[in-house]
Image (cartoon, rainbow, N blue to C red):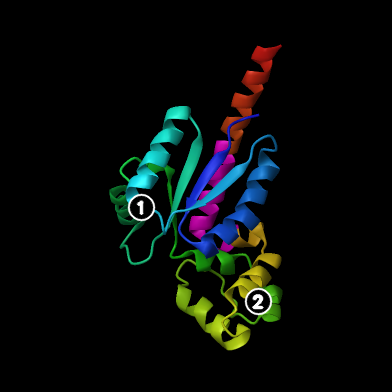
Amino acid sequence: MIEPIVFFVEGKDDKRFFERIISRFFNSLLRKTEAHIVMYAQKRGEDLKKRIKALREIGWEYFFVTDKNSAKCISEAKERAKQRICEVDLSRIIVVVPEIEAWYLAGLDKKACQEIGVPFQDSTDTVTKKVFEEVLALKYNGNRRYFTQRLLDKFSLETAKRKNRSFAYFVSKLSHLCRRLSRKMGKQQQSLR
């Protein structure tokens, strides 16, 4: 078995998304390892630095996921994350454009949007939390957990890759990592023979 991969995510919505969508996708590509999801929004920067340093020292794979939010570009968002946690490698920072809510909505086709009551958009690359919050307030009485569960129930990975470039990039990067880890696992098994 290969060491687990760790995803550092901001908050509860991110964690829910990664547990339901990304962990399943990851496990479909690489069955003999597991994904750990760690929320960092409430953690001190020093604690995160220590944790990432420890992961690097033992050779575990990790990704640090952050929203683009108000950053002018992805590079700026990565630099902001790097300033917060010096130990993180820039190549390990994944920027969600613009926010995790865009990834939730990216996975919905027209039929799913109608069923859930969200406006369909060909691309969610510019969709902010505002659209998400409006539907949440109007149709779901602010019940965020129920709303996000409905979105995840209808989520399509292929649709999301077409509708959000940062999601497509992340899935591609994760697929590449899984191929590399699979080769590593194959070499480990051969050396045991």
Q: Residue at x 44, y 54 (%)?
A: 40
Secondary element at tag 2: helix
* Percent coordinates x, y for residue 54 in the rendering: 42, 34
Secondary element at tag 1: loop
Q: Quadrant of the C terminus?
A: top right
- Separation (CA) of disc 1 from disc 2: 38 Å
Q: Is residue 101 magenta?
A: no
Q: Is residue 141 above or below residue 81?
A: below
Q: Residues within 10 Å of mark 1 (few under 14, many from 20)?
A: few
Q: Quadrant of the N terminus?
A: top right
Q: Is residue 167 magenta?
A: yes
Q: Is residue 78 above or below residue 152?
A: above
Choose between 128 and 133: the one closer to the eye: 133
Q: Is residue 79 left or right of residue 192?
A: left
- Main secondary structure found in the magenta portion: helix
* Quadrant of res 120: bottom right
* Percent coordinates x, y for residue 140 in the rendering: 62, 83
Which residue is identified by label 1? 44
Which residue is identified by label 2? 113
* Percent coordinates x, y for residue 122 in the rendering: 56, 71
Name the residue type under label 1.
Arg
Instruction: Provide the residue span drawn in magenta.
Output: 161-177
* Quadrant of res 178: top right
Choose between 51 and 189: the one closer to the eye: 51
Callout count:
2
